[in-house]
Image: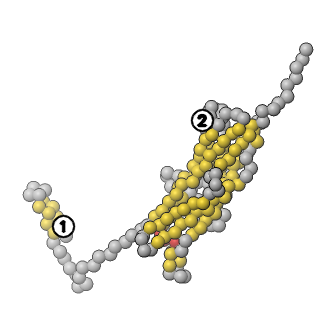
Amino acid sequence: TASYDADTGVLSVDKVLDDDGVKFTNTHDANGQTTLGGTKTIENRKFKSGDTFTFTITPKDGGKLPVDADGNEVSEVVLTPTAGTNTGSFSFGTFKFERSELWNDTTKAYENKEYTYEIKETAGSISGLTYDTHTETVKITASYDADTGVLSVDKVLDTDGVKFTNTYDTTGDTTLGG
């Protein structure tokens, strides 16, 4: 039991032992995290005020979704880029992992977990714009090293990262009268 006397400035500690003596229990909870986002580029046109672009992320093998700053799961984000530019960035938030998620009760050991995610752009309705239809695949691996107590989270992207490019059709028709 500890007590502090503010008048004298003395901290007093009394020990009380039960029949088992003194016991100490230390706990350690390792956590790891990573963020995931990408870039959006438009060719042959600058972004305009009111332009929006939507991206989805889908776990393919039971993986968890990322969370926003409030802890809410995120499966879709909307990018509202700065007008006058032709590249913007978006983020799905943070993937958070806890050591307990990597424990295997059958083997009584920690095991690496690898999750695969697909990221796609949802076609919008901007006239003259050809939307990017490819799918980005991202792998996230969480691993725990029991010797060091470190939980690592690694992501594998393709060589150019998560990128989507739309092309604006600059051709058009006009009728001249005379």
Q: In the orientation shown, which residue stands out farthest toward the bottom?
A: 19
Say which residue label 1 marks.
2
Establish if 17 lies above or below 71. Answer: below
Dividing the picture into quadrants, the one containing residue 87 is top right
Point out which mark residue 82 bears.
Answer: 2
Residue 39 appears left or right of 24 = right
Q: Position of residue 84 (x, y in %)?
A: 62, 31
Dividing the picture into quadrants, the one containing residue 146 is bottom left
Say which label, 1 or 2, has the lower sequence index: 1
**Crowdedness near tag 2: few (<14), some (14–19) or many (≥20) residues, C-alpha within 10 Å:** some
Q: Is residue 75 visible?
A: yes
Mark 2: which secondary structure?
A: loop
Dividing the picture into quadrants, the one containing residue 42 is top right
Q: In the orientation shown, which residue stands out farthest toward the right?
A: 178
Residue at 64% x, 63% y is: 116
Establish if 148 lies above or below 75. Answer: below
Residue 123 appears left or right of 87 = right
Mark 1: which secondary structure?
A: strand
Q: Position of residue 127 (x, y in %)?
A: 76, 36
The three-letter code of the residue at mark 1 reads Ala
The three-letter code of the residue at mark 2 reads Thr
**Crowdedness near tag 1: few (<14), some (14–19) or many (≥20) residues, C-alpha within 10 Å:** few
Establish if 178 lies above or below 22. Answer: above
